[in-house]
């Protein structure tokens, strides 16, 4: 039952991310709900579930991106593993720590995506590069308490 | 800090292999996933459209009044242009030019947008079953929008002209100066490779060039809003405002070659 609900949550996140309302788009940026979902699963469920749904969320994102290599499938599973390892070293019970982890993860994931695009030969103005690097992590972090609540309700 | 036991290491290797296998067979998942998501996306986009109509009722009412005035102005302009068009076709016939065939279109509706901020693409509700193929050019009544990059049975993906991986050979309509339009992920586009003495000024109209193999000649791209020198000082570049508001596309026309 829990797995079905989590699967449904992935589908809803994908639909939301594809059809994000225009009036909620700030500076042409929207939050990465699928990555926030993946990170929250590491906090509120066991590692195996988090890893499987992390891969699923990454795959769902890659399917709708123009790239032919599933970079997000790899990075999402990597983030799941690294956050799991980190949570065994430090306490992630505090909500501020969790928010900080979401912020850093989305920021690092954005750096990877940006570098992949730059590596493909595309030229992006510095201002737009920085905007895409900074605003989505802040936006995702601002929305993450809501995602935490939903994931907590599903997994508990 | 990260000391791994043997069992964990084997697990990591196995999971990594599985992830790499999945990532390399990404195209297999695309068709079925797009088919699954199409009805939900169509419904959500319809709901979103109606909700925005209700929320922004007052803004839409003022906009409708403004557009009403503009329609009247354009109607009178259209009348003048019709005269010019008829004169032009008469002259073309006289010169024995082959009459340019009119473009044929497939109309489609936008049901989804980019997943992240690093790419600029939209998903439309028509695919291979409607005759849409990868590589087809997409526009609307205002101008060029982009190109189909992927097409499954039910949906297609359009790479918009403001995506940084997009490169369009283009010319300045007034002076026939050639350049390359590329996206910036922002509102505007950049026209590069302009010589220092290029005849280009603010307000010039940019259209697709006949050198472009991917786009038909003469499609409206946008208008120059600024011309600046490159850091090296050898070339100049122009900032172009697209004719189409790429952030708010709802309906598109796919050109059948």
Image (cartoon, coloured by chain):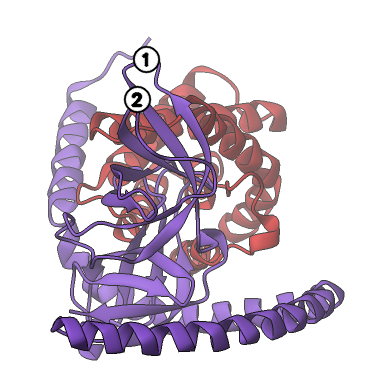
Pointers 1 and 2 in contact (C-beta within 8 Å)? yes
Q: Disc 2 marks which residue?
A: B196
Say above or below: A23 vs B169: below
Q: Nearer the viewer, mark 1 or mark 2?
A: 2
Calculate the distance from the C-alpha at mark 1 to the C-alpha at mark 2: 8 Å
Q: Disc 1 marks which residue?
A: B233
Return the residue nearer the eye: B43 or B83: B83
Say above or below: B64 vs A101: below
Residue at image location 39% in from the left, 27% down from the top: A82
Colour of chain B in the image: purple
Return the residue nearer the eye: A60 or A81: A60
Output the letter for the chain in red: A
Residue at image location 56% in from the left, 45% down from the top: A44
In the picture, the disc for residue B131 is none
In the rendered structure, the answer to whether residue A99 lies left or right of residue A44 reads right
Return the residue nearer the eye: B1 or B85: B85
Q: Quadrant of the C terminus of chain A?
A: bottom right
Residue B104 in sight from this viewpoint: no
The percent position of residue B256, horizontal first and vertical second, equals 22, 82
The percent position of residue A102, horizontal first and vertical second, equals 57, 34
Name the element at disc 2: loop
Residue at image location 47% in from the left, 88% down from the top: B83
- Indicate the quadrant where residue B252 lies: bottom left
Say above or below: B1 vs A43: above
């Amino acid at each position: 039952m829990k797995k079905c609900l989590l699967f449904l949550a992935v589908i809803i996140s994908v639909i939301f991310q594809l059809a994000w309302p225009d009036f909620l788009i700030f500076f042409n940026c929207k939050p990465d709900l699928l990555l926030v979902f993946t990170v929250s699963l590491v906090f509120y469920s066991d590692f195996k579930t988090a890893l499987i749904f992390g891969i699923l969320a990454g795959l769902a994102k890659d399917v709708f991106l123009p790239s032919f290599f599933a970079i997000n499938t790899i990075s999402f599973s990597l983030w799941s593993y690294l956050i799991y390892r980190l949570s065994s070293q430090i306490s992630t019970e505090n909500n501020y720590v969790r928010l900080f982890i979401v912020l850093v993860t989305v920021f690092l994931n954005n750096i990877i995506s940006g570098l992949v695009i730059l590596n493909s030969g595309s030229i992006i103005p510095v201002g737009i590069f920085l905007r895409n690097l900074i605003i989505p992590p802040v936006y995702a972090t601002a929305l993450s308490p809501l995602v935490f609540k939903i994931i907590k309700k599903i997994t508990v | 800090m990260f000391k791994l036991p043997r069992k964990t290491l084997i697990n990591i290797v196995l999971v990594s292999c599985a992830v790499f296998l999945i990532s390399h067979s990404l195209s297999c998942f695309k068709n079925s996933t797009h088919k699954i998501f199409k009805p939900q996306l169509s419904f959500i986009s319809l709901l979103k459209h109606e909700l925005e109509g209700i929320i922004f009722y007052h803004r839409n009412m003022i906009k409708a009044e403004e557009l009403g005035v503009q329609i009247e102005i354009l109607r009178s302009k259209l009348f003048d242009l019709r005269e010019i068009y008829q004169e032009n076709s008469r002259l073309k016939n006289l010169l024995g030019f082959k009459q340019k065939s009119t473009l044929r279109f497939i109309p489609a509706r936008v049901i989804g947008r980019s997943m992240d901020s690093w790419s600029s693409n939209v998903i439309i509700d028509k695919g291979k079953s409607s005759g849409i193929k990868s590589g087809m050019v997409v526009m609307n009544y205002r101008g060029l929008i982009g190109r189909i990059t992927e097409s499954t049975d039910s949906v297609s993906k359009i790479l918009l002209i403001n995506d940084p991986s997009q490169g369009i050979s283009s010319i300045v309509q007034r002076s026939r100066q050639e350049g390359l339009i590329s996206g910036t992920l922002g509102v505007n586009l950049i026209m590069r490779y302009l010589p220092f003495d290029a005849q280009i000024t603010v307000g010039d109209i940019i259209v697709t060039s006949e050198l472009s193999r991917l786009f038909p000649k003469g499609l409206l791209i946008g208008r120059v809003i600024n011309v600046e020198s490159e850091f090296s000082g050898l070339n100049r570049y122009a900032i172009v405002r697209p004719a189409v508001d790429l952030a708010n596309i709802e309906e598109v026309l796919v050109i059948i070659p």
